[in-house]
Amino acid sequence: MSDQTASLKDGADNANEPSFIIQRIYLKDLSLEQPNAPAILLVPAEPQIQVEIDVSVDPLADGVFEVALISTLTARVDSKVLFLVEAKQAGIFQFSHIPPEQVDPMLGVTCPTILFPYLRSNVADIISRAGFQPIHLSEINFHGMYQHRLMQAQEAAEGDGSSTAAESKIILPN
């Protein structure tokens, strides 16, 4: 009888323990365009690559959020688009009994860090399937990106309306 009581007490204690659950990771959107094919495929120049990455967070229910990494990769040859890849890698994350001041950094840093390898793989795969050498996205410092966004929000709150959403994206040079 005492074992059952101890077991029930342990279960009640665990019910109030902080938890972070990955409910699902999925590819929400993926597109590839080659607007200047086939003529541009015959140009013997090395393409210039531009990569943009952004993070979006949407609350779904109490303590449940969809976090999405949104990327645009553009390859140009002689200022013409060789190919354009747009991808949105998303996940549903659940937070229970986590202090509110810790949820925001987890949404801005931890969740994108979990999603990034999936995004990287899907982008490389679609580029390869289009007939090009795969492009593997470089690692991203999501903590730095999160800190940058906090600074932008603080500047905007102080009345310096010069910050825009476009400034918070990460743009990687080739």
Image: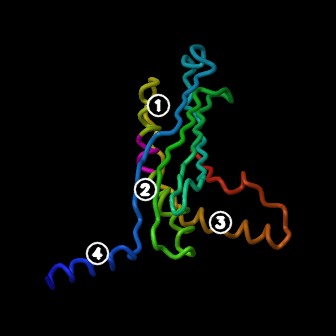
Residue extending furthest toward the front: 1
What is the number of the mark on residue 36?
Answer: none
State the residue in front, 13 or 76.
Answer: 13
State the residue in front, 38 or 21.
Answer: 21
Tell whether position 119 is magenta: yes
Q: Name the residue at 60% across, 62% down.
A: 145
Look at the magenta stretch and give its main secondary structure: helix
Going from the N terminus, do you reach mark 4 or mark 1 first?
Answer: 4
Dot 1 corresponds to which residue? 127
Q: Are marks 3 and 2 in contact (CB under 8 Å)?
A: no
Dot 4 corresponds to which residue? 11
Mark 2 belongs to which amino acid? Ile
Dot 2 corresponds to which residue? 114
Going from the N terminus, do you reach mark 3 or mark 4 first?
Answer: 4
What is the number of the mark on residue 148?
Answer: 3
Question: Can you say whether 66 is above or below 50 in the image?
Answer: below
Q: Are marks 4 and 1 in contact (CB under 8 Å)?
A: no
Q: Are marks 2 and 1 in contact (CB under 8 Å)?
A: no
Between marks 4 and 2 in the image, the one whose residue lies nearer the viewer: 4
Question: Can you say whether 96 is above or below 32 in the image?
Answer: below
Mark 3 belongs to which amino acid? His
Residue extending furthest toward the bottom: 2
Q: Name the secondary structure under disc 3.
A: helix
- Residue 110, x across and y down, in percent: 47, 63
Going from the N terminus, do you reach mark 4 or mark 2 first?
Answer: 4
Relative placement, left or right, of 171 versus 90 is right
Between marks 2 and 1 in the image, the one whose residue lies nearer the viewer: 2
Image quadrant occupied by the N terminus: bottom left
- Residue 77, x across and y down, in percent: 62, 28
Between marks 3 and 2 in the image, the one whose residue lies nearer the viewer: 2
Mark 1 belongs to which amino acid? Ile
State the CA–CA distance, disc 4 to disc 1: 49 Å
